[in-house]
Amino acid sequence: MGKYEPLAEFLKRQPTSEVRMSFAEIERVIGGKLPPKAQHHRAWWSNSPSNNVMTKAWLKAGFRSEQVDMASRKLVFRREKKVELPKSVPDGKPGGHPLFGCMKGTVTIPAGVDLTEPADPEWGEIAYGNASR
């Protein structure tokens, strides 16, 4: 178990979507001191997964850091809302959103129709003032 795993476990057990903590409370949860950079550099608390090991712990738990107050040594961890897509769409095929492909088969393009041509050839002339009067 890594040094910051207790924080991830602590956050996962929280019933609320917002967990307000002081740096001292975090240190009690992890059973050790935060590094000096955490005490003095706001960037240490960013949500970039490449930031530090502790960031990975709260991200793994499904939280993001917010409202980091370096002067008061406090912050908020907010649970991320994840949108769960269904495992299958109505036609039984796996993956994607159920609305993806819902219009399939409802539009037919007749042979010989060029979709790149304007529907009304005069539209360009009217729109750009080139219409002969």
Image (cartoon, helix red, strand yellow):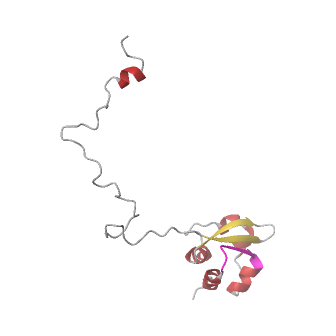
Left or right, 85 with respect to 116, comes to right
Residue 33: image location, x then y, percent: 72, 82
Q: Quadrant of residue 7?
A: bottom right
Residue 103: image location, x then y, percent: 34, 54
Q: Quadrant of residue 118?
A: top left
Left or right, 7 with respect to 97, comes to right
117, above or below 126, in the image: below
| Residue at 18% in and 41% down | 111
Q: Nearer the viewer, residue 8 or 16?
A: 16
| Residue at 61% in and 75% down | 58
3, above or below 100, in the image: below
In the rendered view of the protein, which quadrant contains the C terminus? top left
Residue 74: image location, x then y, percent: 76, 71
72, above or below 9, in the image: above
Q: Nearer the viewer, residue 41 or 122?
A: 122
Q: Residue furthest right?
A: 72
Residue 116: image location, x then y, percent: 29, 36
Q: Quadrant of residue 32?
A: bottom right
Q: Which residues are magenta?
A: 15-24
| Residue at 71% in and 78% down | 34
